[in-house]
Protein backbone atom coordinates (compact mmCIF):
# COMPACT_ATOMS: atom_id res chain seq x y z
CA UNK A 1 0.00 0.00 0.00
CA UNK A 2 1.06 3.54 -0.66
CA UNK A 3 0.83 6.03 2.19
CA UNK A 4 0.61 9.81 1.84
CA UNK A 5 -0.28 12.30 4.58
CA UNK A 6 -1.56 9.48 6.81
CA UNK A 7 -4.21 8.58 4.25
CA UNK A 8 -3.96 5.01 2.97
CA UNK A 9 -4.85 4.14 -0.62
CA UNK A 10 -4.90 0.71 -2.18
CA UNK A 11 -2.33 -0.05 -4.84
CA UNK A 12 -4.37 -1.57 -7.59
CA UNK A 13 -3.33 -5.01 -8.57
CA UNK A 14 -6.17 -7.37 -9.31
CA UNK A 15 -4.81 -10.06 -6.96
CA UNK A 16 -4.62 -7.97 -3.81
CA UNK A 17 -7.12 -5.26 -4.56
CA UNK A 18 -10.12 -6.68 -2.71
CA UNK A 19 -8.12 -7.08 0.50
CA UNK A 20 -6.56 -3.61 0.21
CA UNK A 21 -9.86 -1.98 -0.67
CA UNK A 22 -11.61 -3.70 2.24
CA UNK A 23 -8.89 -2.49 4.61
CA UNK A 24 -9.05 1.05 3.23
CA UNK A 25 -12.84 1.17 3.52
CA UNK A 26 -12.75 -0.13 7.10
CA UNK A 27 -10.02 2.28 8.23
CA UNK A 28 -11.78 5.28 6.72
CA UNK A 29 -15.36 4.31 7.64
CA UNK A 30 -16.44 4.02 4.02
CA UNK A 31 -19.78 2.23 3.83
CA UNK A 32 -19.92 -0.63 1.40
CA UNK A 33 -23.36 -1.85 2.35
CA UNK A 34 -25.55 -3.32 -0.34
CA UNK A 35 -28.48 -0.88 0.11
CA UNK A 36 -26.31 1.89 -1.38
CA UNK A 37 -25.62 -0.05 -4.56
CA UNK A 38 -27.93 -3.00 -5.19
CA UNK A 39 -30.93 -1.11 -6.65
CA UNK A 40 -28.71 0.54 -9.28
CA UNK A 41 -27.01 -2.70 -10.25
CA UNK A 42 -30.32 -4.55 -10.41
CA UNK A 43 -31.65 -1.87 -12.77
CA UNK A 44 -28.54 -2.27 -14.91
CA UNK A 45 -29.26 -5.98 -15.37
CA UNK A 46 -32.65 -4.98 -16.79
CA UNK A 47 -31.94 -1.83 -18.83
CA UNK A 48 -28.13 -2.11 -19.28
CA UNK A 49 -27.68 1.65 -18.99
CA UNK A 50 -24.08 2.32 -18.00
CA UNK A 51 -24.38 5.96 -16.90
CA UNK A 52 -26.37 5.17 -13.73
CA UNK A 53 -23.49 2.93 -12.58
CA UNK A 54 -21.16 5.94 -12.80
CA UNK A 55 -23.67 8.19 -11.06
CA UNK A 56 -24.14 5.67 -8.23
CA UNK A 57 -20.37 5.26 -7.88
CA UNK A 58 -19.85 9.03 -7.67
CA UNK A 59 -22.74 9.79 -5.33
CA UNK A 60 -22.78 6.72 -3.08
CA UNK A 61 -19.13 5.66 -2.95
CA UNK A 62 -17.04 8.74 -3.64
CA UNK A 63 -19.63 10.93 -1.93
CA UNK A 64 -18.55 9.49 1.42
CA UNK A 65 -15.04 10.92 1.19
CA UNK A 66 -14.06 14.22 2.82
CA UNK A 67 -13.16 16.99 0.34
CA UNK A 68 -9.42 16.95 1.10
CA UNK A 69 -9.14 13.34 -0.12
CA UNK A 70 -9.93 14.36 -3.69
CA UNK A 71 -6.59 16.13 -4.11
CA UNK A 72 -4.80 12.92 -3.15
CA UNK A 73 -6.63 10.21 -5.11
CA UNK A 74 -5.86 9.51 -8.75
CA UNK A 75 -7.16 7.75 -11.84
CA UNK A 76 -5.80 4.41 -10.62
CA UNK A 77 -7.90 4.64 -7.47
CA UNK A 78 -10.97 5.57 -9.54
CA UNK A 79 -10.68 2.62 -11.94
CA UNK A 80 -9.87 0.14 -9.17
CA UNK A 81 -12.68 1.16 -6.83
CA UNK A 82 -15.18 1.21 -9.74
CA UNK A 83 -13.93 -2.27 -10.71
CA UNK A 84 -14.45 -3.47 -7.14
CA UNK A 85 -18.07 -2.30 -7.03
CA UNK A 86 -18.98 -3.67 -10.45
CA UNK A 87 -17.33 -7.03 -9.83
CA UNK A 88 -19.06 -7.30 -6.45
CA UNK A 89 -22.56 -6.81 -7.87
CA UNK A 90 -22.38 -7.96 -11.50
CA UNK A 91 -19.97 -10.92 -11.45
CA UNK A 92 -22.77 -13.39 -12.20
CA UNK A 93 -23.29 -11.67 -15.55
CA UNK A 94 -19.93 -10.17 -16.58
CA UNK A 95 -16.21 -10.69 -16.32
CA UNK A 96 -14.12 -7.61 -15.56
CA UNK A 97 -10.65 -6.40 -16.42
CA UNK A 98 -8.71 -3.30 -15.53
CA UNK A 99 -5.82 -2.04 -17.58
CA UNK A 100 -6.78 -4.47 -20.32
CA UNK A 101 -3.94 -4.88 -22.81
CA UNK A 102 -4.73 -4.63 -26.49
CA UNK A 103 -2.79 -3.55 -29.56
CA UNK A 104 -3.90 0.09 -29.15
CA UNK A 105 -2.77 0.37 -25.51
CA UNK A 106 -4.36 -0.45 -22.17
CA UNK A 107 -8.00 0.34 -21.56
CA UNK A 108 -8.86 1.34 -17.99
CA UNK A 109 -11.86 -0.91 -17.52
CA UNK A 110 -13.67 -3.56 -19.52
CA UNK A 111 -16.69 -5.65 -18.72
CA UNK A 112 -17.70 -8.55 -20.95
CA UNK A 113 -20.88 -10.63 -20.73
CA UNK A 114 -20.38 -14.22 -19.64
CA UNK A 115 -21.15 -16.92 -22.24
CA UNK A 116 -24.39 -18.73 -21.47
CA UNK A 117 -26.03 -15.64 -19.97
CA UNK A 118 -28.29 -13.06 -21.58
CA UNK A 119 -25.33 -10.67 -21.34
CA UNK A 120 -23.02 -12.67 -23.61
CA UNK A 121 -21.64 -10.53 -26.43
CA UNK A 122 -22.21 -7.32 -24.41
CA UNK A 123 -18.82 -5.64 -24.04
CA UNK A 124 -18.20 -2.27 -22.38
CA UNK A 125 -14.89 -0.42 -22.56
CA UNK A 126 -14.34 2.56 -20.28
CA UNK A 127 -11.61 5.16 -20.20
CA UNK A 128 -11.56 7.07 -16.90
CA UNK A 129 -10.05 10.52 -16.54
CA UNK A 130 -9.63 12.06 -13.11
CA UNK A 131 -9.36 15.80 -12.59
CA UNK A 132 -8.47 17.55 -9.36
CA UNK A 133 -10.63 20.36 -7.93
CA UNK A 134 -8.73 23.16 -9.70
CA UNK A 135 -9.64 21.65 -13.10
CA UNK A 136 -13.14 20.46 -12.21
CA UNK A 137 -15.17 23.51 -13.23
CA UNK A 138 -13.54 23.65 -16.66
CA UNK A 139 -13.99 19.93 -17.31
CA UNK A 140 -17.60 19.88 -16.10
CA UNK A 141 -18.42 22.74 -18.48
CA UNK A 142 -17.45 20.63 -21.52
CA UNK A 143 -20.30 19.48 -23.72
CA UNK A 144 -18.14 16.84 -25.40
CA UNK A 145 -15.13 14.80 -24.30
CA UNK A 146 -11.70 15.92 -25.42
CA UNK A 147 -10.77 14.67 -28.92
CA UNK A 148 -7.70 12.80 -27.66
CA UNK A 149 -9.86 10.85 -25.21
CA UNK A 150 -12.33 9.98 -27.96
CA UNK A 151 -9.50 8.77 -30.21
CA UNK A 152 -8.08 6.68 -27.38
CA UNK A 153 -11.30 4.83 -26.53
CA UNK A 154 -12.22 4.39 -30.22
CA UNK A 155 -8.88 2.67 -30.80
CA UNK A 156 -9.57 0.28 -27.91
CA UNK A 157 -13.05 -0.48 -29.25
CA UNK A 158 -11.76 -1.05 -32.77
CA UNK A 159 -9.14 -3.47 -31.48
CA UNK A 160 -11.73 -5.39 -29.45
CA UNK A 161 -14.11 -5.60 -32.42
CA UNK A 162 -11.31 -7.01 -34.58
CA UNK A 163 -10.52 -9.71 -32.01
CA UNK A 164 -14.14 -10.45 -31.12
CA UNK A 165 -16.35 -9.55 -34.10
CA UNK A 166 -19.48 -11.09 -32.55
CA UNK A 167 -19.35 -8.71 -29.56
CA UNK A 168 -21.52 -5.65 -29.29
CA UNK A 169 -18.77 -3.27 -28.14
CA UNK A 170 -19.83 -0.04 -26.47
CA UNK A 171 -17.27 2.52 -25.31
CA UNK A 172 -17.41 5.26 -22.72
CA UNK A 173 -15.34 8.13 -21.46
CA UNK A 174 -15.87 9.03 -17.81
CA UNK A 175 -14.57 12.22 -16.26
CA UNK A 176 -14.53 12.27 -12.47
CA UNK A 177 -13.95 15.88 -11.43
CA UNK A 178 -12.81 15.73 -7.82
CA UNK A 179 -15.88 15.88 -5.57
CA UNK A 180 -17.54 18.44 -7.87
CA UNK A 181 -19.19 16.18 -10.42
CA UNK A 182 -18.83 13.66 -13.21
CA UNK A 183 -19.45 13.33 -16.93
CA UNK A 184 -20.04 10.16 -18.92
CA UNK A 185 -20.21 9.96 -22.69
CA UNK A 186 -20.89 6.95 -24.83
CA UNK A 187 -18.53 7.13 -27.80
CA UNK A 188 -19.86 5.82 -31.07
CA UNK A 189 -17.98 5.30 -34.31
Image (cartoon, helix red, strand yellow):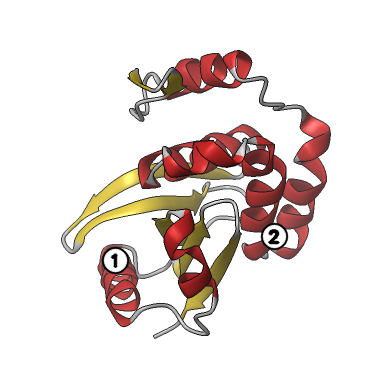
Residue farthest along the left direction in this orientation: 103
Q: Helix, strand, or loop for circle 1?
A: helix
Residue 17 placed where, x, y %? 43, 24
Q: Helix, strand, or loop for circle 2?
A: helix
Residue position marked by numbered label 2 in the rendering: 52
Q: CA distance from mark 1 to mark 2?
A: 23 Å
Residue sitting nearer the eye, 105 or 121: 105
Tag nearer the camera, 1 or 2 = 2
Q: Is residue 146 above or below residue 157?
A: below
> Upstream in the sequence, badge 1 or badge 2?
2
One can see residue 122 in this view:
no
Residue 100 placed where, x, y %? 30, 48
Question: Dot 2: few (<14), some (14–19), or many (≥20) neighbours within 10 Å?
Answer: some
Q: In the picture provided, is 149 more to the left or to the right than 133? A: left
Question: Dot 1: few (<14), some (14–19), or many (≥20) neighbours within 10 Å?
Answer: many
Residue shown at 62% from the left, 36% from the top: 66
Residue position marked by numbered label 1 in the rendering: 156
Amino acid sequence: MAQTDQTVYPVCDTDGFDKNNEYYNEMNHIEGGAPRYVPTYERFTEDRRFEPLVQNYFEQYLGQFPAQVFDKINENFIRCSFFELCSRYLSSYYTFAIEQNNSAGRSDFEMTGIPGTDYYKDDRIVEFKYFKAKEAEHMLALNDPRPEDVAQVRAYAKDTKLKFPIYNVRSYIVYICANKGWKCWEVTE
